[in-house]
Image (cartoon, rainbow, N blue to C red):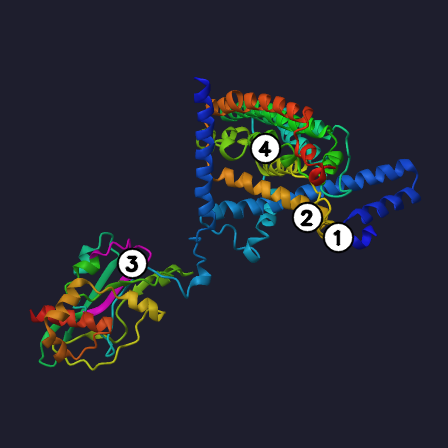
Amino acid sequence: MLLYSQPLELTKLVHSLDAFFRSSLSPFWATLVEGILIGIAILAAYALIALALIYIERKIAAFFQSRLGPNRLGKYGVIQSIADMIKILIKEIIHVNKIDKLLYYLAPFFVIVASVLSFGAIPFGQSLQAVDFNIGVFYVLAVSSIGVIGILLAGWSSNNKYSMIGAMRSGAQFISYELSAGFSLMTIVVLSGTMQFSELIEGQRYCWNLFNGHIPAFIAFVIFLISGHAETNRGPFDLPEAESELTAGYHTEYSGLRFGFFYLAEYLNMFIIAAIATTVFLGGWMPIQIKGWDAFNQVMWYIPSWIWFFGKAFVLMFLSLWVRWSFPRLRIDLLLNLEWKYLLPINLVNILVMVIIVLSGLTLADIFPAVFGK
Amino acid sequence: MSFSKYISGIYTGLKSLVGGMMVTWKQFWSKKVTMEYPENRKTLVISDRWRSELIMPHDENNEHACTACGICMRNCPNGTINVISKKVVNEEGKSRVALDKHLWDYGMCTFCNICVISCPSNAIIFNNDFEGAVFDREKLHHQLNHPGSKLREKKKTVPAAPKTPVAPASEATEATRPTPSVVTAGTSTSPADNKTDNAPKTNPSGNLSNEHTDKENN
């Protein structure tokens, strides 16, 4: 029945693969093979999404500046980012003297591993999630913070004052905004009562958390977008690599593929922030469902869940790019002002308001159980 | 900082951020200014004032207005122009100086326009055929006078029929010959000369020849 009602869903493929391995191999080898396959799939998705994102970013950036963007290679320049990838792969890696060799070579891997780890926990669609942790939100917050170690190491080991200043700025910024991002996600955890991504999504079947928690959820959403944006070192918060002051910040001394790792991680972090916001606030891969409208719900399910997921994530990424190309860069003290004097106090009050709303039954699902109830 | 100021600060901050985003949103949907050059050759508009290649307009009798006076050569700031003259003997048996070769180096020219301004006979102009790239440096050395061309005689009756210009596209030719105000003034104030010349007003090189004769008449 599921096969006919949702023809483009990947559930059946995943389940039949699983059944095939389980039936033909011993449990240990089946798990190992599946683990390797999932790893390959995640890395491939990581690279492909990064390529797509770089193209999308360049196009959107161009449109915000009344340009056309890449338009030479392929129709509308679609294979431009593949050409760029080949270029960065064959570029010479310049060896720098008087660096801390071990840390210097290690730093890009910290950044990219943190990015891949949090990428792996994202539910991309129905049954398209590598591991469904019962503390998924907490896990993502924890592993995404590893990235800042890589940035600090890169700045420190480059033995270059600009890199060092860039890295210190990045560290200050990242640690500050990590607080806000964590608290805004905690607000939603209070609302939905779970940290597991699958349960979070299931709980938003008829009413997204953004609407279910109305005012505090909306405030948490805005704060998460701002702080997530700041964590990715982009847009108005890109002062760790402020090119007018610090040449390129922490990755000044990196070249070739090592620089490519930082670059890739930056783009993927933008996607990861959008994906987490999608999952936590906008119902994840769950299609739009309205209670009682069974025909409508069925039609919505015809669109595969991963398209819903990427569609919602794209809207948030567009918002991020829109912000990036709208606002001038913040000064470092204003940046910390924004976090410590505005976002954090508002967030603390907000989480309290959310607790009161949940305890006194003022969420939309509690007020209108017939429309929005689970 | 009082509490009300804090709250109003947040409000005005958010308001200005949304205002800024609205501005970029409009920009996002605005018409894009990028010109996709090789594809848009047909619709490409090059300014009339764009100076690209120095040419010497010839009329349909293969005659130009250059008297080989060499003023352009002497005025050229970096020696781009080389005017080589020769002595010719006319029907009356008088020996006169005439143009042998007007040489111009595309690679050295700074396009300052001094040669065009200083030319007393308006014999040379800049066109705007901007695609001047060649694979051989020798091809940058242009000889402006056509082979076998000679000086246009004064008071000579020129039959009407616009000659096909040197520049490639017809749109380009319109823009190619910038018609300075002096020229139009000359043609409008002295209609008699135009009649004697019988030169078509639509032809820009014809206008130039008018100008040439006007000056000499004056």
Residue that mark 2 sits on = A307
Q: Chain of mark 4?
A: A
Tell if the residue under mark 3 belongs to the same chain as the one under mark 2.
Answer: no
Q: Chain of mark 3?
A: B
Q: Position of residue B67 (x, y in %)?
A: 16, 68
Q: Position of residue A102 (x, y in %)?
A: 65, 25
Q: Disc 1 residue type?
A: Leu
Closer to the observer: label 3 or label 2? 2
Closer to the observer: label 2 or label 4? 4
Residue that mark 4 sits on = A218
Circle on res. B51: 3
Question: In percent of the image, x 63 and y 43: which residue is there?
Answer: A312
Give the residues drawn in magenta, as a range. Answer: B99-114
Q: Chain of mark 2?
A: A
**A45 on left or right of A335:** right
Residue that mark 1 sits on = A8
Q: Are marks 1 and 2 in contact (CB under 8 Å)?
A: yes
